[in-house]
Image (tube, helix red, strand yellow):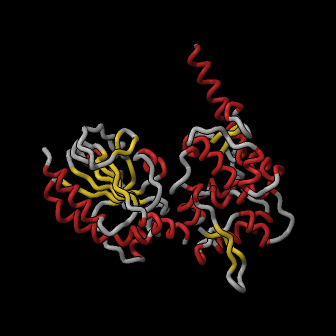
Amino acid sequence: MRKAFTATIVLFMLSVSAAAQAPQATLTADQQKVLDYLLAHWGRDTAVTGIDLGMKIVGGRYTTEDRYSLAVYIREHPELHRVVRTFGWVPVALTREEKVTARLLSRAEREKRSAPTMAELSRAVEARPAVIRESLRMLERFGIVRADATAGGVGYWMANDDYVNWEGTNKIDFMYHRVQIEGQDPLDTY
Amino acid sequence: MGATLFAMALSATLAAQGVDGGAVRSHTSSAAVRLRPMPPLDLETLDGKRFSSSSLSGKVVLVDFWATWCMPCLQEIPTWNHLYKRYASKRFTMLGVTVQSGWASDIRGDIKEAKLEIDYPLVVGNDKVAREFGGVFGFPTTFLVNRSGKIYKKYTGQYPEKAAQIEADIQKLLSEQ
């Protein structure tokens, strides 16, 4: 009885978690334009262009919500492009601020230190606290960090061990550089 | 580009380390150490079959973590082919764990395009395997496993004396009962 109850709770939690990150079956027409751009440009000149840059280049009124939808879609469709299969969805989904924030939290947790404070993150990431807060919100939404009061500092730890051990050849260390070849669109590369 | 530079930078960091339950030990020490077992492997081969580490039982194994875009990794392939052939009849084998290079079909395509001749078995690796080996912080990273299935040494990067060092270590492990 108790086991069954526990199993039900676990299943419920899993379904809630799955629902929270459920992939969108389709993209809007404007989101599709960004995806088409990325698919056409990834791999050219070692481009691993992020969704945020793709949205800027395509133009129009794109929001963080659009980036989230595109990121989830790309995460669920690695067959879309070799770049996703090679480097994963994270490098193209996260902004520079989110990558650096995640990297700093990951390193602190791995080294068994307290999580960095907002002031420390703001200084290291070179972004205003409001940007850091938004980065943490998005990282939490992507399931990369989780709120944890015991972490100290900003109160976040990595959501699972994969992300704690993320640095090195794993994806978080791929801090893509934004470059521009004369006469072409800017691109993110590794 | 940056990843290749990272791999090349690692090449300058000469490192061959013994592995002791997660801690790194010096190989110049004669003190007895407790080696960490190689994690069990159940991975896909490039032709879509399953590869199990049980097939490595009782053999000295050189496990190379490489990526198809990593130039230092590609430069080492002739050396691995040479060692694989030279010691194949002496309970030695080699395994290339291909990471961050996409699916098996992607890897096959890269090998064909670059006209790579790889004689030893290749499998499709992942972050989990790299982590279970104790962490791979750059490519190439090579592990030597003894006949008891324990990780004897970890070689990080590409450096001039690496091949000779590994061959000497292989000979040492093969000579042990």
Residue B29: image quadrant is top left
> Is B117 rendered above or below residue B18?
below
Left or right, B124 with respect to A116, comes to left
Q: Residue at x 59, y 67 (%)?
A: A190
Measured from the top left, where is residue B63 in percent x and y?
32, 55
Position of the N terminus of chain A, as image quadrant, is top right
Measured from the top left, where is residue B10 in percent x and y?
45, 63
Q: Which of the pair B62/B89 is nearer the observer?
A: B62
- Res. B106 visible in picture: no
Measured from the top left, where is residue B168 in percent x and y?
20, 59
Q: Residue at x 60, y 21 (%)?
A: A6
> Is B143 rendered above or below residue A83?
above
Left or right, A135 with respect to B36, comes to right
Measured from the top left, where is residue B42 in percent x and y?
37, 46
> Farthest right residue?
A61
> Farthest top residue?
A1
Q: Which of the pair A100/A186 is nearer the observer?
A: A100
Q: Residue at x 62, y 62 (%)?
A: A175
Q: Which of the pair A175/A55 is nearer the observer?
A: A175
Left or right, A117 with respect to A4, comes to right
Count of marks placed on residues: 0
Residue A51: image quadrant is bottom right
- Res. B159 visible in picture: yes
